[in-house]
Image (cartoon, rainbow, N blue to C red):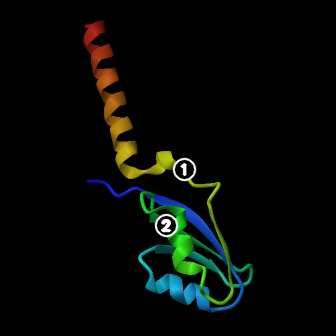
Amino acid sequence: MTIERMAFIVTYKGKEVPKKLEQMDVNLAYVSKRMGYSIVYYDKHKGEKLLLKELKNIKGFIGVEASKFFNDEANIVKCQEKILDTEEKYDTINEDLK
């Protein structure tokens, strides 16, 4: 079973939101104290609504949005599957040439 994660950008003012993110079931990848945002990875099946529900009552929280730079193809399992597919294609081409 693979766990598919999605990148979210959490915007905030103050110090309470990053502290709460450290306690939550998210992978806190980056915190910008000066710019007031964090990048977190969260389970895709749980979604943005559950993350928003957990954060909306925290002082200083502004919003959550899906990261525009998140690459779904960067999922390790999917990349491994693509590599195996291309290796199989090359094997069949080499067999045809012989």
Q: Position of residue 91 (x, y in %)?
A: 28, 21
Q: Amino acid at mark 2?
A: Tyr
Taking the spot 65% from the left edge, 90% from the top edge, the residue there is: 59
Q: Answer yes or no: do the residues labelled 1 and 2 have beta carbons within 8 Å?
A: no
**91 relative to 66, above or below:** above
Q: CA distance from mark 1 to mark 2?
A: 12 Å
Q: Position of residue 31 (x, y in %)?
A: 61, 79
* Dot 2: element: strand
* Dot 1: element: loop
Considering depth in this image, is 47 or 21 the residue closer to the camera? 47
Taking the spot 72% from the left edge, 85% from the top edge, the residue there is: 13
The crowding category of the residue bearing disc 2, from other C-alpha atoms within 10 Å (few below 14, some 14 to 19, many at least 20), is many
**98 relative to 35, above or below:** above
Specify whether 28 is left or right of 25: right
- Give the quadrant of residue 14: bottom right
- Give the quadrant of residue 62: bottom right
Q: Amino acid at mark 1?
A: Asn
Instruction: Return the residue at label 1.
Output: 71
The extreme right residue here reads 35
Taking the spot 33% from the left edge, 22% from the top edge, the residue there is: 89
- Give the quadrant of residue 23: bottom left
Q: Is residue 26 visible?
A: yes
**76 relative to 41, above or below:** above
Q: Which mark is residue 27?
A: none
Q: Earlier in the sequence, mark 1 or mark 2?
A: 2
Instruction: Return the residue at label 2.
Output: 41
The crowding category of the residue bearing disc 1, from other C-alpha atoms within 10 Å (few below 14, some 14 to 19, many at least 20), is few
Considering depth in this image, is 87 or 16 the residue closer to the camera? 16
Q: Position of residue 26 (x, y in %)?
A: 45, 74
Q: Position of residue 32 (x, y in %)?
A: 66, 79
**3 relative to 53, above or below:** above
